[in-house]
Amino acid sequence: MKISTATLALTTLVLEAQAQSCQPLSTPGNPMLAALKSFVPNVTTLVASFPPTWSSCLGSISPTSFMADIVPAMASQPSCAALPAVLAAPPSNTSTNLWASLNVSVDYCTATVQPVLPCINSVLLPAAVKQLNGNACCSAMVQDFKTAFGDAPDVFLTKLINMASDVICSTQSPGLNGAVSQTCGTAWTQSLTGGDVDASVSTITSRLLTALQVPNNQACAAARGDAFTTTTGQVVSTLFTKPYVPDSCIQPVDTLVSYMRSWPAYKTQGMPQLFENGQCIQGRDITKALGSYSTVYIQLGVTKNQLEGACFHVANGGLGGCAFSTQLTRVAPPMDFSMSATGAKKSNAIASSVTLLALTVVAAILW
């Protein structure tokens, strides 16, 4: 039986429409979900927390098409040649001691982060953006990003990846114990442990609790290990013990937090107190929100009274002008933090995701 040209054309259109349908990422048998499961742990739980627009976008992207864009681009970019070796590289520090294992060596950053950043910036992210811009199912997610973060996804991810790399792999000169330099990842680990690899969890928790109560105008003193006044009016001189202080390594953290402060989501979420000058979030408001979830205090290593007596603020803004005794060398280039777009009111799902992401970032950088 002969099949007409019109029938073939109609069949092709139907198949293409089915392929382009905006199916959620959680759909059983979704190709992208199957691909993610191979290298992202607990991806199903992670996907369940995505706003619908994100899920529909990612679920509609073909892994095959995505790789077809990435592979040739990587082959043409010399900086991507190091990627396989980086992914297979052993940890920077193989110590069995928790705090000692968090020290990040200069050599490790030089061999991994520095070669990979150009590949991410010039190849991987542009390829991802091509998929987003060419997919009608992703237009809502792109707009959600602009609304929540003030940036399109590619700009947002580029900034976040480069800033996070700076927080860990920027170098501080001179280093401790006669070293020419050390990474900021090491500086922060040593600062929080006081140089004691056997520091107790309660000691670290106490320092973190205090570090999250530093007003903007007291951050320079705190980073140098000098006495400062907390958001509750308490004078503290023992947050960091000299010579184990973050000093100039506070600057990459300031850059990242200042970017987070610029997100429209924080203003619409009613959380500007976390970043704005002279403001803080009362601990009693947090304990009230936690309600009967008493296990949270055990998990955090704090008591309810400790939280209620605190007023939380993430220090940021202008720390590049502090007088430090060490010199900072960043691994990522300077960036423009002006927002590329502003947004109107967004969905509750996006707002929740932004809050979760931001708090995760703050916890990850330990300030």
Image: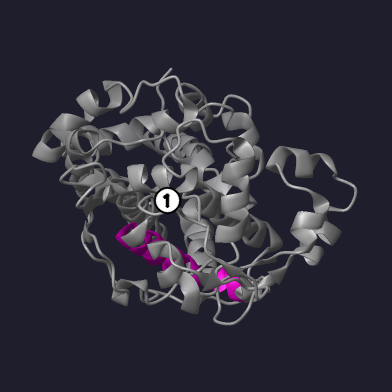
In the visual, does 162 lie left or right of 102?
left
Who's the residue at 45% across and 45% down the image?
A: 194
Q: Is residue 263 visible?
A: no
Who's the residue at 61% across and 37% down the image?
A: 201
Who's the residue at 62% across and 55% down the image?
A: 209
SS assignment for the magenta stretch, majority: helix
Location of residue 226 in the rendering, given as x and y in whole percent from the top left corner: 44, 67
Location of residue 332 in the rendering, given as x and y in whole percent from the top left corner: 23, 55
Observer-nearest residue: 64 or 214? 214
Observer-nearest residue: 217 or 28? 217
Residue ranking furthest to the right: 292
Observer-nearest residue: 93 or 332? 93
Instruction: Give the amino acid type for the residue marked by disc 1 in the picture.
Output: Asn
Who's the residue at 46% across and 50% down the image?
A: 365
Q: Which residues are magenta?
A: 248-267
Location of residue 217 in the rendering, given as x and y in whole percent from the top left corner: 48, 79
Determine the secondary structure under disc 1. loop
- Crowding at mark 1 (Cα within 10 Å: few <14, some 14-19, many 20+): some
Q: Which residue is mark 1?
A: 135
251 within the magenta span? yes
250 within the magenta span? yes
Tell me how many marks there are. Answer: 1
Location of residue 41 in the rendering, given as x and y in whole percent from the top left corner: 53, 26
